[in-house]
Image (tube, grey):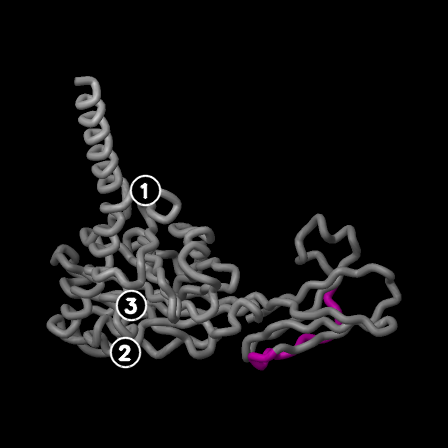
């Protein structure tokens, strides 16, 4: 009797655990619509889907403001992919209920990659509600598929309320509904942005613009852009402000005699200034460091600036300007 009772208790605990996972796991909602972001890697075995909260967070953001995306973690990215080279992402949402007089049923939100990080992409076109409905269905299925997988697995580091790692081969997963970046050939173009094969090595960034595509005609509404870096950090900058130039990464520092050469990554059109400080400056902001020499205009390739000094010790930073 005690043995049977123990088995019954174990079964009850297992049932409660599954209910807890279903209640507290990944739960993207359509009312109001949440903005989802999915990551996958070329040839990878896993993918990551995160819920960034109500899409109103992005279309109502104060113009020009920038905020970090914290709904997924570096550990989840590391568990999903071998590295951040050849990793693609799409952010998307869809209006599946007719509750908003401004953003009617079948409104779709989708990203579009920037070919040049400093230049906004061409907006997606508005379309009929019938055409948008096909993509809207696939987008909502990405969320429900991720929630289904999350609910059938125990919670943990890779299965939380805001992000879930799932197999790339999962029949109802992110890739199953995204297809070749165009939501299984239902969308007007490829919404996916892919990091280059040397992304981590070169400390790169990629940017994708977020658009609100309401039923109708003409261009969609630009909401701002996502920036994804080689460290795995993702941020969003709302439209309407002056877009900052991407932060440069110093690639090498060499010294010959009294001349120090600092090489760094650039974005075409941005201005770069070399800054220097003694050891005392390390305790404060680089805003107080001394500008050195002239500025240089970025070309998209690695450039260099030099400083001539007899000081035995110097520290350097490169400042980017719009």
Disc 2 marks which residue? Answer: 189
Q: Sort mark 1 into few (<14), some (14-19) or many (20+) by Cα contacts within 10 Å.
A: many
Which callout, 3 or 2, points at the residue further toward the start of the chain? 3
Which callout, 3 or 1, points at the residue further toward the start of the chain? 3
Quarter of the picture holding the N terminus: top left
> Residue 155 shows which numbered tag?
1
Q: Who's the residue at 33% across and 60% down the image?
A: 37
Q: Which residues are magenta?
A: 290-301
**Mark 1 element type:** loop
Choose top left, top right, bottom left or bottom right for residue 15.
top left
Q: Sort mark 2 into few (<14), some (14-19) or many (20+) by Cα contacts within 10 Å.
A: some
Q: Sort mark 3 into few (<14), some (14-19) or many (20+) by Cα contacts within 10 Å.
A: many
Q: How many marks?
A: 3
Disc 3 marks which residue? Answer: 110
Q: Who's the residue at 46% across and 56% down the image?
A: 78
Which callout, 2 or 1, points at the residue further toward the start of the chain? 1
Residue 197 appears left or right of 299: left
Q: Are marks 2 and 1 in contact (CB under 8 Å)?
A: no
Q: Nearer the viewer, residue 17 or 130?
A: 17
Q: Nearer the viewer, mark 3 or mark 1?
A: 1
Quarter of the picture holding the C terminus: bottom right
Estimate the x, y position of residue 261 in percent, counting from the top left.
75, 73
Vertical side of 163 occupied by 101: above or below:
below
Q: Nearer the viewer, mark 2 or mark 1?
A: 1
Let me know if residue 133 appears in the view: yes
């Amino acid at each position: 009797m005690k043995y049977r009772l123990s088995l019954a208790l174990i079964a009850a605990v297992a049932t409660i655990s599954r209910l807890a996972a279903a209640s507290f796991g990944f739960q993207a909602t359509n009312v109001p619509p949440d903005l989802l972001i999915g990551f996958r890697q070329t040839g990878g075995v896993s993918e990551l889907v995160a819920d960034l909260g109500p899409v109103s967070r992005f279309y109502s953001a104060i113009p020009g403001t920038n905020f970090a995306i914290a709904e997924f973690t570096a550990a989840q990215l590391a568990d999903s992919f071998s590295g951040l080279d050849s990793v693609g992402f799409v952010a998307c949402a869809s209006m599946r209920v007719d509750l908003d007089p401004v953003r009617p049923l079948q409104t779709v939100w989708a990203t579009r990659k920037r070919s040049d990080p400093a230049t906004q992409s061409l907006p997606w076109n508005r379309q009929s509600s019938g055409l948008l409905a096909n993509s809207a269905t696939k987008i909502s299925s990405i969320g429900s598929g991720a929630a289904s997988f999350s609910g059938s697995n125990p919670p943990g580091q890779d299965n939380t309320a805001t992000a879930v790692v799932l197999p790339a081969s999962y029949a109802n997963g992110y890739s199953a509904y995204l297809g070749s970046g165009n939501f299984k050939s239902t969308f007007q173009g490829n919404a996916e942005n892919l990091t280059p094969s040397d992304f981590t090595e070169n400390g790169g960034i990629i940017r994708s613009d977020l658009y609100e595509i309401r039923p109708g005609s003409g261009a969609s509404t630009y909401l701002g852009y996502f920036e994804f870096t080689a460290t795995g950090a993702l941020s969003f900058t709302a439209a309407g402000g002056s877009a900052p130039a991407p932060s440069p990464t110093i690639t090498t520092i060499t010294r010959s005699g009294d001349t120090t050469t600092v090489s760094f990554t650039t974005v075409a059109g941005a201005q770069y200034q070399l800054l220097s400080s003694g050891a005392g400056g390390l305790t404060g902001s680089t805003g107080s460091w001394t500008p050195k020499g002239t500025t240089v205009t970025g070309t998209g390739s690695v450039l260099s600036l030099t400083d001539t000094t007899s000081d035995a010790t110097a520290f350097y930073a490169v400042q980017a300007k719009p």
